[in-house]
Each structure stands twice: as structure tokens, then as C-alpha cells.
Image (cartoon, helix red, strand yellow):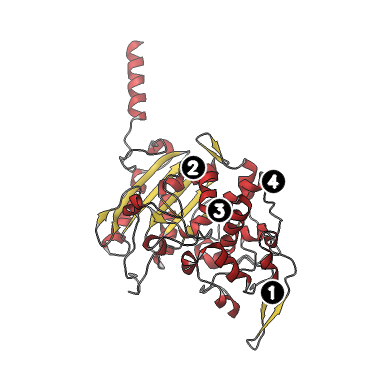
Amino acid sequence: MLKKLVLLCGITIAFSTQANDFVAKTKNIPFPVANLAAAGFSSEGLARIDQFFASEISKNRVPGSVVGILRDGKLVYLKAHGVLDPETKTPMPIDAIFALASMTKPMVSVGVLNLTQQGKLPLYSKAIDYYPELSSMKVAIQKADGSIDYVNPRRPITIQDLLRHTSGLTYGGRPDTGGSASALYPAGADLPSMNGTKEFISKIAQLPLVYQPGTVFEYSVSFEMLGAILEKVSNKSLDQYLRDTLWAPLNMVDTGFHIPESKKSRQARAFKLNPLDNKPQRIHPVEKDVTFECGGGCSLGTVTDYLKFGQMLVNGGALHGKRILSPQMVQLFTSNQLGKNIDNRVANVEPHRDGYGFGLGVAVRLEPGLAAVPGNVGEFSWNGSYGTAFFADPKEKLVVVFGTAAPGELRKYYREQVQDLIYGAMTR
């Protein structure tokens, strides 16, 4: 009997201490490390992630990367590849700080819904309730001869419109945006250098809407508007509000709109020239502190911090004993909000995500097919224009975050390839 017990214990110990070579041996890992077989991943499959980035780095297409995978709340993979800075050749650390760009948006959404569940920010309230100067905005109608007429909005922009990008606002400089009125808007890369919320609201209030509110999914400065509304409702800066509501409770210690001097040596930097066309490129929030805490794209953070955010959502709104949203609010956040009367143009922004709708800040998979990447109905995601990406698959209890400093077109290639590699490494 004793012999059997010792043998059983030996097996148990061997199993529970099985090495996972795909998780960096570093301190302060915020999740338990998974056993690969139990987590449903193959070591051969995960090795393909290493091989992929080794190849990309050797070809000087990207300086480096950090990739993190959680399943069932345990770390399956967390590794850094390449260099943090192509000039200094500093090795990429696990806690590299990336400019998150539009991955700021889902965090702002959670900030909005946190107020909504407190009865402080109803989703059908109007943007003009918070900034009356927006009431002068018209809708631009481009005529066949190229001239523009201006008409009144059929209804005001709501908070729900802003969250699902049906506000009629747009971004300047986007190839997928129709109408010459869009050229009047600031491009996303120009927003961090604006002189704060006051300048942003003053600028936008003078521009026309490019669509009637509630009719078209049009990727836009809606989240910059939401950030301004959060500041008005909370009476705090956007950085302080998100820190109090989300980042501090989840111990997201390296996330914010302003990186302290002591941490700037960990910021990931891009090649000075885009490897595809040899044109200059830059990541503004890394090179210069932002002067506008824009809710659509101005925050920075680490892969491990964002894993905490993603796991909180997959858990139904709570992590490590801290509840941010109710499960019902998370369900609303991750449910398609583009009804039959709304023109769904999500795939214009993310071409490999055909068959996706949009929730209240994230793309949501509606069908098992159509998209060029594997996944399940209900998978939700959003990415950043400087080379970061995030997706979560509640059915698989899967959360994935990766960071690169790749602000050019290569970022879209990496989004698709990483999703293929991760699902391709799964055994169940």
C-alpha cells in the first residue's frame, strides 16, 4: 500500500512540476503556469511561434515581440523575441512597454460600462448632454458632381453610437473612409499631440458628420469623444479615471497615458524606416509624451498587464477578487451591436475578420466561417496600429495578447499569422 502511495505521489509530483519551456523564467508572473498537455497545447505547435518570429527578426522585418497566451486562467506561453530597440540592440524583455494605440478603446469601453452599471452614464444618453457645442454638427452629403450639402442629423449621437462606431464621426486619412468630408478630420496619429480635451472637442464640433448617426459602422474618433465624456462625468482626467477604475484594481502597474522616466528604458521602438517601403515611420507616444489623453489610442502598457484585462473579461468581469463589471455588462460589451439597419463595415478595418460584427468596443465573431482566421462564435478582439493585438475566445477560455513595434502594414500580417499559429498549436 505504501509503495503504491509513493508511486502515485511520484506521478503526481512529476506531472505538476512538468517544465513549460514556453513561459519565460521571470519573477512576478501574474498567473500560474500551465501544463501544456492539460492545457491542450502541443510543444511542437508552440515552437512554431518561436520559429516564425525568429524568421521575421532575421529578415529585419520587425525588431522583436512579446507573445502571451492564457488558457483556463493559466499561462501557456509568455516569451520575448528579438530586441527592444533596433538602435541599441537591447534584448526584448517580457515587461516591454508597447504603445497600445487602439487597444486603448476596449479599456475605455469598460470604463464607460462601469459608470453605466452605477446608473451614471446611460448608453442612450446623448453626447450633446455632456458637450452642448456638438449640437451644431451637420451631416455632409456628397453629391454626384462632387459638391457637398449639409443636412441636420435625424437624431443625436448617443453613447451607444460612440461605443459601436455608428456616431457618424470618422478618422482622417483612412483609405476605407468615403466622402471628401473625412479629409477634414484629424488622423489617428495626429491626436496624441493635440492640446488636451478642450482642443479636441473644439475641433470636432466644427466638422460635419460623414454619416447619419446609427446607420453605418465607421471607424472613428468616437472613443476620443468617449474619453472626453468620461472626464466630464467622473470629474477626473482620463488617465486618473481608468487608473482608479481599472488599472489599479487589476494591478496593471505598467499601463497608462504617461510613462514615468524610470520605465522609459523599457519602451519598444520601431525601425526608423518601414521595412516594406523604406519610408520613415514613428511611434509618437514612445518618442514624445502625449499632450492629449485620447481614449481611442494614446495609452501604453505591457503584454502581461493586458492579459489581466483580457482574463477579467473572460471571467465575466472579475479577476483576483476584484470585480470591474457585472457578468451581464460583459455580455452586453461582447455582443454584436450592429443590427440589420446598420451597414457593417468591420472587415474594411480588419480584412481577415469577415463575418464579424461589433460590440461596444470590440469586434465580435458571428459565424464559424467567412473569416480568414480560426476561432469560435463569440470570440472578441481589437488591435493597435503600432503593432499590438488582443483576442479572447470564451468558448476555449483563451486570451491572447502580443506586442510588436511594427506601425506599418506588417502589423496586419502579424495579427493574422499569430492567430493561425496559436489555434494551430491547440490539441483540443
Q: Residues within 10 Å of mark 2 (few under 14, many from 20)?
A: some
Query: Relative to the observer, which residue lies in front, 313 or 70?
Result: 313
Name the residue tied to disc 2.
248
Q: Which mark is residue 108?
A: 3
Q: Amino acid at mark 4?
A: Gly
State how far apart marks 3 and 2 are (Cα): 15 Å
N-term mark: 1 or 4 = 4
- Note whether residue 354 is visible: no
State how far apart marks 2 and 1 are (Cα): 40 Å
Q: Amino acid at mark 3?
A: Val
Name the residue tied to disc 4.
119
N-term mark: 3 or 2 = 3
Q: Residues within 10 Å of mark 4 (few under 14, many from 20)?
A: few
State how far apart marks 4 and 3 are (Cα): 17 Å
N-term mark: 4 or 3 = 3
- At 34% from the left and 25% from the top, the residue drawn is 13
State how far apart marks 1 and 4 are (Cα): 30 Å
N-term mark: 1 or 3 = 3
Picture coordinates of residue 156 (x, y %)? 72, 65
- Note whether residue 327 is visible: yes
Q: Amino acid at mark 1?
A: Lys
